[in-house]
Amino acid sequence: MTRSRITKTLIALSATAAFVGGCGSDDGDDTAGTADKAAIQKGGTLTGYYSEAPDSLDPALASLVNAQTAIFAAYTPLLTYKRASGPEGATLEPGLAEALPTISSDGLTYELTLRDGLQFSDGSPVEASDFEYTVKRLINLQSFGVGYYLGIDGAQKYADDGKEAGDISGIEADDATRKITIKLAEPDAQFSYKLALVYAGIVPSGTPFKDQTKKPPPGVGPFTIEDVKAGESFSFVKSKTFKALPSVPEANADRIDISVVENQRRQAQDVLANKVDFINDPPPADQLRQLREEAKGRYKEFTTNSTYYFVLNVEEKPFDNPEVRKALATAVDEGALARLFSGLLEPDCNFLPPGMTGYKKLTCPFGEPTAKPDIAKAKQMITDAGVAGQEVTVWSDDGDPSPQVANYLADTLNQIGLKAEPKSIDGQTFYESVTDQSTKAQVTVFNWFQDYPHPASFFANVDGNNITKTFNVDIGNVNDDALNALIEEGDKQLDVKAAAPTYEQADKAVVDNAFLVPYGHRKLTVITSDRIAFDNAVFSPVYSLDFASLGLKAAE
Amino acid sequence: MSVLPAASAAVSPWRAALRGVRRNKAAILSVIALALVILSSAGAPLYADHVAKTGPLTNHLSDYIELDGQSTPVVEYDGVPIGPTYTGKYFLGADGNGRDVMVRLLYGGRNSLLIGLSATLLSLLVGGALGILAGYARGATDGLISRALDVLWAFPVILLGSALGAATALGGIQLGPFALSGGSIWLIAFVVGLLNIVYIARPIRGAVLSVGEQAYVEAARAQGAGTFRIMRNEIFPNVSGTLLALFPIILTQAIALEAALSFLGAGVKQPKPSWGTMLDDGIDTLLAAPHLTLVPGGVLVVTILALTVLSDVVRDALDPRGTKTAETLVGAR
């Protein structure tokens, strides 16, 4: 990825991370039990709660995860992710394209063919040229996702020229043959994954270059988004023109009405009392125990493709000393930290999450997450390193449980002989602050949710080529030649499975050198009412709950 | 020097206040409650070191304690902390980070009381000086001070406090040679004190306007006494009763305001304890761990109640004819 792309991606992600809205694999705990899949009844109206309004319901501008979850049900790109729970849901499949792209040997040219007979939800035909228009729209609207597509040859020039009617030279679309040819300025082995992001959900040519949230534009998908009341509610209505694609089934329900209810306590009570059919965000910590006990069979926890970790700035004392970083890693108690997340954290020392290609459970070099940390050993390491008493500031945002994590870490650092203080700052300015080199943040409480299901999305955070003065993705200034080489080697592989061993090595290198200190992967929850066929619901590891999969239980 | 007729002609304001307290059972109970709160807070390090054997910032997330012969986690895996044990360790339970609530309550009391007291002294000092100056000098000086106070008065106190607290949280304040770093409890005391200046300055100005008309002030002026001397020797002694009556009222306000600001995240910064931050710690686990909010909330209520009773008694003692209520003294905002 280029720096500008990474920057834009991270801005979006930093916002989405605050919502912890979604991306999960199904391989975590499942308190729903092992019931057989229930028969589903087609049709009906369902209801659901969002705890925060989506930032936009225009596919070009929806950047928060809860918004993208909605877009996923109504707009299909050329490629898409398999509608399946767990790691399988990260599989790339053809969406509106007939097949996965044919990629030239130099990795620069992608050829796709649009499926025949596709219609937008307003009945108008889908044309190959609509793809180029969709990309132009991203650029003109300055979408958070635009960075993913600026690698297309001519896209940057189109952006720089500022002429709406201009041409993107790297996209050739033939409406007659439905062929789409995309030429990249430089090889990008992850480009197929970017084509499957909801930003590339195709909209008709002529859709205004303005936010269409009030009346979302026609798309191709199981639902259309209608009746939008900004900040309050919107509805999914089953599309009359959509016919199931091999990778995208039709919706089970006729309509899903979503309301924004900020009070998560009320959300939990309403779903428990079957007053609403599902809630998508984690309930308050003090209601988890009740939900775990009373909502068996309709409550699920799943581990997301995310990693929670401590960023150690290797350019700042005392963490420029590898032994100090290792001492910190030795002192961290992953099991203790999981308690701060009310148990919604899978303790682990890997940087890559379990649902990601390239993940291989590491033998944790500084102690297993299930074992008590060796504080005495860590203290000795600090003494030996000659940094005892050095002042350290632990930075975090102010969203729960980050301040509590910062408090824990500061206390732990004090126990091992450093002089640490936590500093929690407003979430709105946190990312900008800690990614600015002038802040000189020594330790940062941080987390990362995947941009797309590819290890490159994670390793950008420790790639020395990404170091910048501001909006520095590599917050810890990790710049290790061996690690950089591994990341480069993995990133250039077109087949992510072939790159898995390389990413495994990179993961091990990050952990062994304590370039950062991962402590777990976030779990999220889904709860439905009794009338929902819970076992049929799909929890995509990329876009969370697949609304099209929700349906009523068939009458017995 | 003469004394305002509003206070007793024979008894000093201090004696009058003390006599009022002695004659009122509720006031005696309040004094006992306050003394307990103050003494126990002062003894926080003793309790932490010798009874609880842990500090206010020390996490015990994955520790276990023996309870009724059973090994019990201080914090359950689902994040719910242990409730009151009524033993040396975790007497009032633990919080979400596994910290001893009793220890934090005592240390929190130190911070809350220290901030309240410092802020009140600052308000009395600056507000009193501004009030005396405005009331005695009158004219342009009075206009300038009064309008500045009007501006301060115009803002809802919590809103202004939150804004000031948030704005200074990172960089602190630099006032000439005096620097208050972000996160320091003295910074919170400064903000709270600043917000309460108006409650002192206004009634004092009013009192000075009245005192300034008295014959003994005229007499002092006729004898050639300077402005400062008149203010010090004639005006101040005659408004000191009002200042004394205002002291517990403002202290009550200061403690409540600090708790409110800390609860909102604009006051004392974590992990330092104060009753306000402890309330904030517990709000997300209100159902599963109610002790986290009930304990600091209860102590806060007792303290505020005791101070309010004392305020009334002191005010009654200094204003036996009952012409001034707390609201008329400080005004309603």
Image (cartoon, coloured by chain):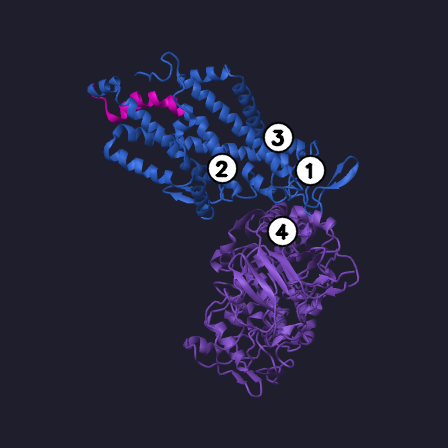
In space, the residues marked 2 and 1 are separated at their CA atoms by 26 Å
Pair 2/3: label in front = 2
Residue B233 belongs to magenta span: yes
In the picture, the disc for residue B83 is 1
In this picture, is A498 found above or below A270? below
Residue for badge 2: B258
Q: Position of residue B46 (x, y in %)?
A: 62, 30
Res. A506 image quadrant: bottom right
Which residue bears the numbered disc 4?
A: A267
In the rendered structure, which disc, 1 or 3, sits on the residue that comes first in sequence? 3
Q: Earlier in the sequence, mark 2 or mark 3?
A: 3
Name the chain letter of the residue that bears numbered label 3: B
- Furthest residue toward bottom: A177
Residue B213 occupies which quadrant of the picture?
A: top left
Protein chain holding label 1: B
Label 2 in the same subunit as label 3: yes
